[in-house]
């Protein structure tokens, strides 16, 4: 494996701190083109930082969506970026988030100050305690995903036992687990894949997505927004996640600014971000915002779709309250009777797996029955 100095400005070939040279592999084509970093885990390990930080940093710097499928060791940045460019960006990451400001050694360990959300580091080489510049967006990610407490490879034993391979693996496992549990757009991507995460299944899914994009291109957008590339909705989701809780007014302003305030995909993403378990009372709370965003059946369907995804992503733990929540959605005038009836008529895999959809609809049965009766009554009143 080709290694390079962690500080590339140091030309000494005996420099102690080495890392693997970053590799990159371009996959896909057209709007679906993306850069996979096959040795992200090794590079991150050499720097003593979780792969999540590096991937997100690339995403922020390149203005690109990122996808992390930690279980499969897949670290992806959308768009085509060659290894040299990424390696240059990595220099920036190393300067800002790894090197000690005093001695320029990379043997630093981050910790989060819970009181004021600042990030400090301890230098194991010289004992300096410094602070990470909080202006970069990545600091939000770091605060939300604190590093696991364990010395990394370069560190001298610091009184907490020795380092061995088992400990390293434990660290890697924990970091991956944390990354996998991140409530970001990546997680949504992963959940879409949750049924079957074998490499084959994922590849099939990627192909399917790419196929959709090609369809849109060839049909010159006549298919409508549902076939658009998802990147900007995922970006919106990430943007929200880093700022929540925030006011509905500010959310609306941002959506308007991005011109996604009448996009059903944005509405589904919004539901997934701002509706919190156990879901009861939440739609009512945000009713004004949803009403402002929705002006078609499709938008209303997106509210239901986002809700379905929420139920799926919380491992079907909130099926009991489905009827109650739907009643709240209906009584808050967020989704019309017609859309609800259509939704309840048969399971759909538009937003979740058909199996999940079926379970949700079973749980919705009391509400749907009530709705049917209520509508019968109002019809007979009309006569
Ligand atoms: Zn130092």
Image (cartoon, rainbow, N blue to C red):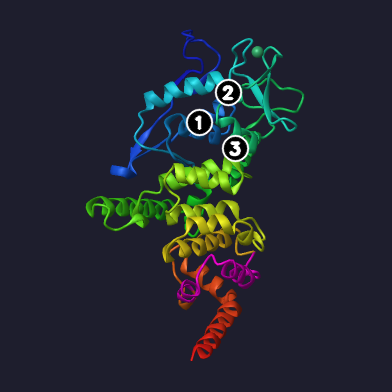
Residue at image mark 3: 172
The percent coordinates of residue 352 (x first, y second) are 48, 63
Judge depth for marks 2 and 3 and give the one in front: 2
Which one is earlier in the sequence, the residue at label 2 or at label 3?
2
Q: Is residue 38 visible?
A: yes
Q: Quadrant of the N terminus?
A: top left
Residue lying furthest top: 12
The percent coordinates of residue 54 (x first, y second) are 51, 31
Look at the picture and state if 71 lies above or below 58: below
Q: Is residue 68 visible?
A: no
Which one is earlier in the sequence, the residue at label 1 or at label 3?
1
What's the residue at 46%, 8% (across, down)? 11
Q: Confirm if mark 3 falls within 8 A of ligand 1.
A: no
Residue at image mark 1: 57
Q: Confirm if mark 2 falls within 8 A of ligand 1.
A: no
- CA–CA distance between discs 1 and 2? 10 Å
* Local SS, label 1: helix
Q: Which mark is residue 97?
A: 2
In this rendering, would 81 be left or right of 8?
left
- CA–CA distance between discs 2 and 3? 19 Å
What's the residue at 29%, 58% (across, down)? 223
Q: Which residues are magenta?
A: 318-343
* Local SS, label 3: helix
């Amino acid at each position: 494996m080709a290694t390079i100095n962690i500080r590339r400005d140091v030309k000494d070939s005996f420099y102690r701190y080495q890392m693997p040279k970053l590799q990159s592999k371009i996959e896909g084509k057209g709007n679906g083109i993306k850069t996979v970093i096959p040795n992200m885990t090794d590079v991150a390990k050499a720097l003593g930082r979780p792969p999540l930080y590096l991937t997100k940093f690339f995403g922020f710097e390149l203005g690109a969506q990122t996808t992390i499928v930690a279980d499969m060791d897949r670290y992806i940045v959308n768009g085509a970026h060659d290894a040299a460019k990424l390696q240059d960006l990595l220099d920036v990451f190393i300067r800002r988030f790894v090197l000690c400001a005093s001695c320029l050694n990379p043997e630093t360990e981050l910790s989060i100050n819970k009181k004021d959300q600042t990030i400090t580091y301890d230098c194991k080489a010289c004992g300096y305690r410094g602070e990470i510049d909080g202006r970069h967006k990545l600091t939000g990610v770091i605060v939300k995903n604190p590093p696991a407490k364990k010395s990394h490879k370069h560190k001298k034993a610091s009184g907490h036992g020795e380092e061995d391979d088992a400990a390293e693996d434990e660290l890697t496992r924990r970091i991956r687990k944390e990354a996998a549990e991140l409530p970001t757009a990546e997680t949504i991507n992963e959940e879409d894949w949750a049924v079957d995460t074998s490499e084959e299944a994922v590849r099939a899914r990627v192909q399917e997505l790419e196929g959709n994009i090609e369809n849109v291109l060839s049909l010159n957008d006549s298919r409508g927004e549902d076939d658009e590339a998802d990147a900007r909705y995922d970006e919106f989701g990430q943007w929200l996640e880093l700022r929540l809780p925030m006011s509905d007014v500010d959310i609306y302003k941002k959506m308007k600014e991005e011109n996604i305030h009448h996009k059903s995909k944005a509405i589904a993403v919004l539901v997934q971000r701002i509706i919190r378990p156990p879901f009861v009372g939440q739609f009512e709370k945000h009713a004004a915002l949803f009403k402002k965003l929705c002006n078609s059946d499709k938008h209303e369907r997106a509210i239901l779709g986002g809700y379905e995804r929420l139920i799926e992503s919380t491992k079907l733990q909130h099926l009991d309250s489905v009827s109650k929540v739907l009643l709240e959605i209906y009584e808050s005038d967020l989704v019309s009777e017609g859309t609800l009836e259509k939704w309840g008529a048969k399971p759909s895999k538009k937003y979740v797996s058909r199996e999940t959809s079926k379970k949700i609809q079973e749980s919705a049965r009391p509400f749907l029955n009530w709705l049917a009766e209520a509508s019968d009554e109002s019809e007979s009143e009309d006569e």
